[in-house]
Image (tube, helix red, strand yellow):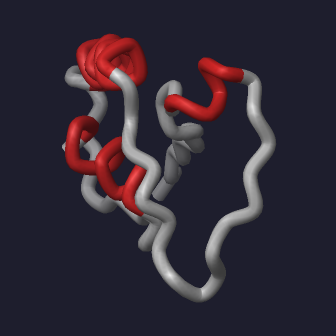
Amino acid sequence: MNNTYFILRHGETPYQLKKEEIIYPWPEPSPILLTEKGKKQIESVAKKLESEKIDLIFSSDIPRAKETAEIIS
């Protein structure tokens, strides 16, 4: 059995857009979500992955990562 793995990074966030560095409030979840452009970036990737037979998606609990995983799924 051959497995294929896809590793994705979340889409654009407001802080990336502003090129700001932030300190995340660990262990509290970061409130940062994707921008509209970030959502479109991930939707584009999702379309490219439609033909793949993805059985399982792993994501961190960080909201921008969860949002990315939800769009991909």
Task: Provide residue 37's location: percent of width, then percent of height.
Answer: 38, 13
Q: Which residue is farthest bottom?
A: 27
| Residue under the point 31% across and 14% down | 40
Q: Residue at x 75, y 33 (%)?
A: 20
Q: Can residue 60 be seen in this snapshot?
A: no
Q: Is residue 27 left or right of residue 55?
A: right
Total numbered labels placed on residues in the image: 0
Rendered location of residue 30, percent (x, y): 50, 65
Nearer-the-camera pick, 40 or 22: 22
Instruction: Point out the image quarter for the C terminus.
Output: top left
User: In the figure, 25 relative to 13: above or below?
Assistant: below
Q: Please indicate whether residue 18 sits to the left or right of residue 64 in the image.
A: right
Q: Is the residue 8 above or below the residue 57 in the image?
A: above
Write the residue at 51% across / 32% down.
13
Judge whether residue 33 can be spotted in this image: yes
Residue at 59% x, 87% y: name it: 27
- In this view, the residue in front, 67 or 16, is 16
Q: Position of residue 70 (x, y in %)?
A: 22, 48
Q: Is residue 16 above or below residue 66?
A: above
Please name whichever residue, 30 or 3, is drawn nearer the observer in this view of the structure.
Answer: 30
Image location (x, y in percent) of residue 43:
27, 19
